[in-house]
Image (cartoon, rainbow, N blue to C red):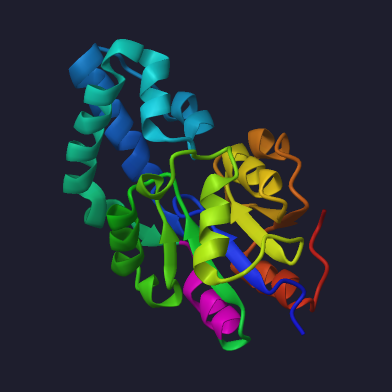
Amino acid sequence: MSRYSTVLFDLDGTLINTNDLIVTSFQHVFRTELGLEVTAEEIYPYFGEPLVRTMARYDEARAESLTAAYRAFNITKHDELVSEFPGVGQALHRLQAAGVRLGVVTSKYTELARRGLRVCGLEAYFPVVVGVDQTEGHKPGPEPALRACELLGVEPSQQILMVGDSVYDMACGQNAGLRTAAVGWTVNRAALAEGHPDHWVESAADLVSLVLGTQEAAG
């Protein structure tokens, strides 16, 4: 019997590697629209929060137009710069085969999230993908995780694990009454630790062990 019956995943930085895509897109928009040069390290802390919220940090009055510019550039580079993290596909196969329900909870639009999964060959594992367009409230609030539970037909509980690479993912899961796991391949480990995850998983194989109850992951 699995330790966790259901696993909800963040997308970017958790299932698929979009780090270069995100940084490149932010840098392009800030350079062309605001005349700013920003480093990857400056952008990393905002990974996982809704895009318009990040843009408002730099220019609140233009947050919507900056978001539109980001998305327009991002889509042109998307397929070129997106890749699966090592071992993720195999891990999802094992979890699905064990009867674990799987869903995605992301701050991206649902359509683009599904495109990323499709490019990486992972879409078939996820009957439920909850994007930022599906809820009024977003991470770090509980609404996206609760919506995913609803669509998967499960009640929020400590038998459900939220997996992510940002404090926004941890807070979303915690606020929904779920358990949380932080991925060790995050670009911002120190900041993620501040989200007080219930577990750390250092590889996709570690995640499988944790979910199926075959090995205790670090708390």
Q: Is residue 117 visible?
A: yes
Instruction: Tell me residue 82's x, y (percent).
Output: 33, 55
Q: Quadrant of residue 3?
A: bottom right
Left or right of 164 in this view: 86? left
Above or below, 35 against 68 in this view is: above
Is residue 159 shown in magenta? Answer: no
Q: In this orientation, does residue 87 appear?
A: no
Q: Which quadrant of the figure has residue 113?
A: bottom left
Q: Percent x, y for residue 123?
A: 37, 71
Image point 42% across, 26% down: which residue? 53
Residue closest to the eye, 64 or 31: 64
x, y percent for residue 213 = 79, 76
Which region is colored magenta? 85-96
Q: In the image, is residue 95 part of the stretch drawn in magenta? A: yes
Residue extending furthest toward the bottom: 97
Q: Residue, x 71% and y 55% (percent of image)?
A: 178
* Dominant secondary structure, magenta: helix
17 up-or-down from 34: above or below: below
Question: At x 47% / y 62%, what residue is drawn?
Answer: 85
